[in-house]
Amino acid sequence: MKDDQGKSFNFNGEPFGSGGEGKIYRINRPGFVVKIYEKLPTPEQVSKLKVMIANPPKTSPSDPGDVAIAWPTSLVYKGKQCIGFLMPEIGRNVQFIQVYNPKSRKKILPKCNWLFLHTAARNFTEIVKDLHKSGYVIGDIKPQNILVNDRAFVSVVDTDSFQVKNGNTVYRCHVVTEGFTPPEMLGFDTSNITQTLYHDRYRVALIIYHLLFTRHPFNEGTWQDSGDEQSQVDKMKNGIWLYNSQGLLKFHISTIPLQVIHPKLQELFKRCFNDGHKDATKRPSAEDWSAALKVAINDLTSCGKIDTHKYSRTYGKCYWCERKNILNGVDIFEGSAKPVISLPPPSNPPVQTTPSTPIPTPSPPLPTKKIIGFVLLAIATICFIGGAIPFGFILGFIGFSCFSD
């Protein structure tokens, strides 16, 4: 096998992953992997890949070794036939679906908290923002195509399914995923639809909702109408969710309410799923989400009881502690109790072995001291008159000393 520069390479073992219509292999070229199609790519696919290779998106700087977008870098040939493409290798990571699901998250990221999920959501919106600015529509946005590492750094894969435009030619995204298809596309042959940024915006909101609330927004609540419950697809088509339920849904005890997130995020979800249901142009952009998530991240604070609990100051209290009490100990951010530092109860102080030195306070003079002084001076005067001068001096000295204090 050779790349489009004629340089040879070999596989390193068996495929370690699959994406779309092919399998992913490591190769003897550090920092790169190869996707080999199961069926030979069509001329349209090859043309699309050539356009992508010649026009990579402009992405925000990242740490060395981090790959935000698994973008094709070279076609791969066997003989003269294109069989796949090279792309940068993404390091150790997990799919978004493993992170927003509390059970799997507990196993792979036991110390994951709401700050981590907010950060991962924002990093995802930054990638979408870069792709949209570069003129690309992602199309098939789903949790399986979004990866995250233990630092909340996000990567997007399966990029060869993106919708690509080259002049008047549009290479459409032919793949959609149930549960992540905008309502206006439901019931149509999506392979014939030229998608827009507004279709992506709907899916971006779905991904963020999954991360922050663990579930699909159109699969929340308890159905309370007398008729049969609508399917998730029908609810999406009709715009029915907890915050536009038309009286058909009520909150379940385990439902995480929208009020626990920052008000700016609440507003964007309602704009997307309510206002944007009939008018796609009202759906928030990736820039809108990134800005709101930045504010929300700065608003998060730590719980005083559990080390993995983070909550919004705007909510005013730790929702996860509150939820844990309501659900009899069920905690989706299970952590360790923080040590409680408290003073011991007051007790009788011990007797001091070495007395302290108090600030001295003068004692009041004895009231008889001056009287004695007067008496001594009177006797001294008599001694002087009677000729007992030495004895008079002694008594006079003592008498005067009684007035010295």
Image: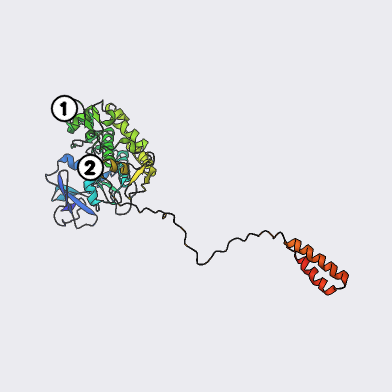
Q: Name the residue tied to disc 1.
A: 228
Q: How is the image coloured?
A: rainbow
Residue 217 versus residue 301 in the image, above or below? above
Q: Say which residue label 2 marks.
A: 143
Image spot of residue 152 (x, y percent): 30, 48
Give how far across and how far down residue 94 sits, in percent: 23, 49
Q: In this image, 21 relative to 128: left or right? A: left
Tell me if mark 2 has few (under 14), some (14-19) or many (20+) residues whose alpha carbon lies within 10 angstroms of its own: some
User: Which of the image's four quarters has the C terminus?
Assistant: bottom right
**Residue at x 71%, y 59% (from the top left corner):** 367
Q: Nearer the viewer, residue 288 or 14?
A: 288
- Name the residue at the left extreme: 39
* Residue 34 vs residue 396, the one in the foreground: 396
Viewer-nearest of labels 2 and 1? 1
At 28% from the left edge and 33% from the top edge, which residue is drawn?
198
Query: What percent of the width, then of the height, locates residue 50?
Result: 22, 44
Residue visible at 19% across and 32% down in the picture: 232
Q: Earlier in the sequence, mark 2 or mark 1?
A: 2
Figure quadrant of residue 19: top left
Query: What residue occupies the far bottom of the structure in this picture?
Result: 390
Residue 227 or 104: which is nearer the viewer? Answer: 227
Q: CA distance from mark 2 to mark 1?
A: 29 Å
Q: Amino acid at mark 1?
A: Asp
Label 1: state its secondary structure: loop
